[in-house]
Amino acid sequence: MTEHYFNALEQKIDQMLQRCDQLEQENRQLREREQQLREERAQLLQLNEQTQSKIKAMIMRLKALEQNK
């Protein structure tokens, strides 16, 4: 009977170790995805700033053209 309990315990430990490995892998993947998203966000923010600057410059040119008429 003791052997049966040790075998059951060993199986549960193996399952827990497998689950731990799986969670570590998922965690690693999530961290990589988070980093990718952070980089993408930074690029989008930079693009947004550039676009805003271009739009402001166009508005200023249009206002200048309007005043010159």
Image (tube, helix red, strand yellow):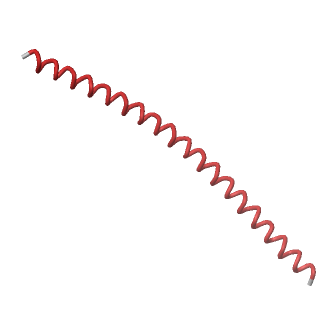
Note whether 12 is above or below 34 in the view shown. below
Side of 40 where 33 appears, left or right: right
Furthest-right residue in this view? 2
- Left of 30 or right of it: where is 54? left
The residue at the point 92 percent across, 84 percent down is: 1
Q: Could you tell me which quadrant the C terminus lies in?
A: top left
Report which quarter residue 6 is drawn in: bottom right
* Residue 5, percent from left and from top: 87, 79
Q: Position of residue 15 (x, y in %)?
A: 75, 67
Counting every numbered tag in the picture gives 0
Which residue appears at 60% of the width and 47% of the height? 31
Image height of 63 relative to 37, above or below: above
Which residue is farthest front? Answer: 67
Residue 67, above or below 43: above
Residue lying at the far bottom in this picture: please name it: 1
- Residue furthest left as drawn: 69
48 versus 20 height, above or below:
above
Residue at 37% from the left image edge and 30% from the top image edge: 49
Residue sitting at 67 percent across and 58 percent down? 23
Left or right of 1, for residue 63: left
